[in-house]
Amino acid sequence: MAALRTYWKKRDFGKTAEPRGKTGRKKGFGYVIQKHDATRLHYDLRLELDGVMLSWAVTRGPSLVPGEKRLAIHVEDHPIEYNKFEGTIPEDQYGGGTVMVWDRGTWTPEHDPHKGMQKGHLDFELHGEKLNGHWHLVRMRKRPGERQEPWLLIKATDEFAGKKSDPDILEEMPDSAASGRSMDEIATDKKRIWHSNKSAKEQSKAAKAGPTKSGPTKAARPRARAPRRKAPAKRSGKKAG
Ligand code: MN
């Protein structure tokens, strides 16, 4: 199965610590949403099927309000190992920026998901730490010039649905489901993991020992109470992903 070929092609695993991963290692229905502060902040929804993670980049993130359709760009399949990835992709690499495991759990397709992918319509249930209940993913027609398929992520009406007047879950629960960290806390941790030939373990040791000549500078160390960014800052020079 060559489902990860595109994923592998886009990345230089000598430079990014994203997992290379393998296809078909597990048969299950894992679910994750990764908050990704790349060129623009977005939320990557991933649903496990046939040993890979089907992936959509949800530009504005999920909404609990059934009437709110959120654009979800179908992107390349990711390895299942990616579900645990939380950290920083170097700025000059594909998808450069900070990645957070925003939600995780399992999903249940309500119909045959293979037919659903062909038809361009998935009905499913999420069993996450933040998102639950029934959801729809609906493919839209690709417009001329569009490289990737646009889909819509829509909350179905059930007991987990929200009202327009409710607070936005993205603002209510902004932090990592895996580590409890904020985006800033993950971002400022990057020196421990990246830009070095040392293993993560060695770097972790070095970081605990305190700043050295090559270690984190004062500016790079985590701020105790970093102000949270409200809106995604548009920055140039980084690639999307
Ligand atoms: Mn992404």
Image (cartoon, grey):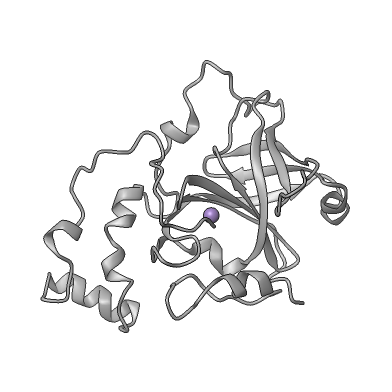
* Total numbered labels placed on residues in the image: 0
Which residue lies most toward the top here? 165
Q: Position of residue 171 (x, y in %)?
A: 42, 32
- Image quarter for residue 142? top right
Residue 99 horizontal side relative to residue 158, left or right:
left
Q: Position of residue 15 (x, y in %)?
A: 42, 76
- Image quarter for residue 156? top right
Q: Position of residue 123 (x, y in %)?
A: 78, 41
- Image quadrant occupied by the N terminus: bottom right
Q: Residue at x 47, y 63 (%)?
A: 85
- Image quarter for residue 231? top left
As drawn, 208 above or below 32: below
As drawn, 211 above or below 118: below
Q: Residue at x 82, y 52 (%)?
A: 117
Which residue lies most toward the front here? 145
Residue 182 horizontal side relative to residue 49, left or right:
left
Residue nearest the observer in this picture, 114 or 41: 41
Is residue 181 at least partly visible in the picture? no
- Image quadrant occupied by the C terminus: bottom right
Q: Position of residue 177 (x, y in %)?
A: 45, 49
Is residue 92 at least partly visible in the picture? yes
Q: Residue at x 44, y 72 (%)?
A: 16
Q: Residue at x 48, y 27 (%)?
A: 168
